[in-house]
Amino acid sequence: MVEKVKLRIAKKKKWYPIMAPAAFRNMELGETLTDDIENLKGRKLSLNLFSLGVESRKQNANISFIVDRIKDNKALTSVDSYFASPNFIRRAVRAGKDKIDCSYLCETSDKVKVKIKLFLITSKKVTNSITSSLRKQMKEFVEKEIKANSFDKNLDSILSSNLQKNLRNFLKKIYPLSVCEVKIFEKA
């Protein structure tokens, strides 16, 4: 008997550019090699904000993009999440100070559910009553701010540190803070 042998024909792979969304000037984030450009949908890519040319102060933050559509042989992305480097968070915490972590699920004005995690570092050790007061006020402020703006406007506010500055100024009436940062901002 003669057995039939299946031959596998390999498709030729090509390089395809991955493009950033309009908020990042539609710049090219990189290239990837694949045989079918449709296979790129859903692929995630994380980059440091400093490498995107946002600001030199933002070298401790990363942004994650997800390929969501293909157009003109280019993989187009949207922002999936923003997150601070764990090394930055570790370096920010010092002896004689308290770190307060909070996590909230919110909905933006354009009906996108987001998860936002923040951390505060007080200038000195604080009592439990001050900690709970800071958490309560922070929750009210953050939920109001997130609900008032779209996902893209909230992301711009975080990237430009406006949300952090406004929150810090709002909370300093309760207790002075040495650090007020967003740890994670992502679609839920």
Image: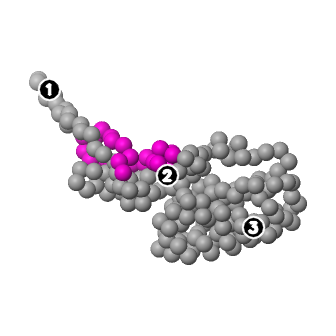
172 relative to 128 in the view: left or right: left
Q: Say if 36 sits above or below 9 in the image.
A: below
Q: Residue at x 71, y 42 (%)?
A: 91
Q: What label does residue 19 carry, if any?
A: none
Which comes sooner in the sequence, label 1 or label 3? 1
Quadrant position of residue 126: bottom right
45 relative to 173 in the view: left or right: left
Task: Please say whether residue 115 is one of the residues in the magenta stretch.
Answer: no
Which comes sooner in the sequence, label 3 or label 2? 2
Q: What label does residue 54 carry, if any?
A: 2
Q: Residue furthest right?
A: 127
CA gap between label 3 and label 2 equals: 27 Å
Q: Residue at x 69, y 58 (%)?
A: 180
Q: Amino acid at mark 3?
A: Leu
Tags 3 and 2 touching, CB below 8 Å: no
Q: Which residue is mark 1?
A: 3
Q: Say if 58 sits above or below 180 in the image.
A: above
Q: Amino acid at mark 2?
A: Val
Task: Please say whether residue 34 is one of the residues in the magenta stretch.
Answer: yes
At which x and y percent is residue 64?
Answer: 48, 51
Q: Residue at x 71, y 64 (%)?
A: 168
Which comes sooner in the sequence, label 1 or label 2? 1
Q: Residue at x 56, y 49 (%)?
A: 58
Q: Residue furthest front?
A: 56
Residue range corresponding to the magenta coloring: 27-54
Please tell me whether mark 1 or mark 2 is closer to you in this view: 2
Q: Which residue is mark 3?
A: 171
Q: Amino acid at mark 1?
A: Glu
